[in-house]
Amino acid sequence: MSKEKLINIIAAPISELKKLKIGIMVRATLPLILKLELITDLEIERLQKSDYSKMTFDLNYPVLKKVDEKISIVENRTIGKYTRYYAKPQKNKNSHYLITSEWYDLNQEDYIRWLKRKVKTD
């Protein structure tokens, strides 16, 4: 996906964005947001916190998890007995992050509002 397409997605009306599946929307937008550094370092820090992710998206896991290079990707992805993060690390500046895979329909409107509020498109 290009930055132009991402900007078009963010600019689309909420009613149109609600037609998309939340997991597909996150996987299409968040990696590019990280790669192109379209959110602040502070927002990256916040997205790694459980309480912020709960308050902002009603998620039970942090949106982002910084990859620990000392352990395998499977270990990085796993919390308890289950993998809670997508397998492909995403780069932002000099770090790699995993994105939570624990998105449900009830998180969709919160994610759309976050996109419109936090992502720098200019």
Image (cartoon, helix red, strand yellow):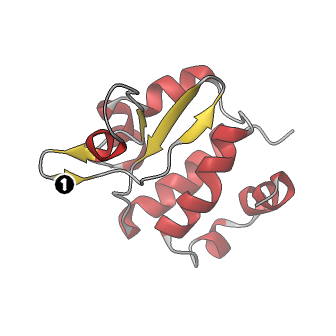
Residue 62 to residue 16: above or below: above
Looking at the rendered structure, the secondary structure element under dot 1 is strand
Please tell me which residue lies in front, 112 or 97. Answer: 97
Please tell me which residue lies in front, 27 or 10. Answer: 27
Amino acid at pointer 1: Tyr
Q: Outermost residue, bottom direction?
A: 19
Q: Quadrant of residue 104?
A: bottom left
Location of residue 70 in the rendering, given as x and y in whole percent from the top left corner: 34, 25
- Residue visible at 49% across and 51% down in the picture: 88
Location of residue 42 in the rendering, given as x and y in whole percent from the top left corner: 56, 20
Which quadrant of the figure contains the N terminus? bottom right
Location of residue 61 in the rendering, given as x and y in whole percent from the top left corner: 29, 43
- Residue visible at 38% across and 57% down in the picture: 101
Disc 1 marks which residue? 82
Left or right: residue 52 compared with residue 82 = right
Q: Check disc 1: other Cα within 10 Å, few if <14, some if 14-19, many if 20+.
A: few
Location of residue 66 in the rendering, given as x and y in whole percent from the top left corner: 43, 30
Residue 13 to residue 73: above or below: below
Left or right: residue 34 compared with residue 45 = right
Q: Quadrant of residue 18?
A: bottom right
- Residue visible at 76% across and 37% down in the picture: 120
- Residue visible at 33% across and 57% down in the picture: 102
Which quadrant of the figure contains the C terminus? top right
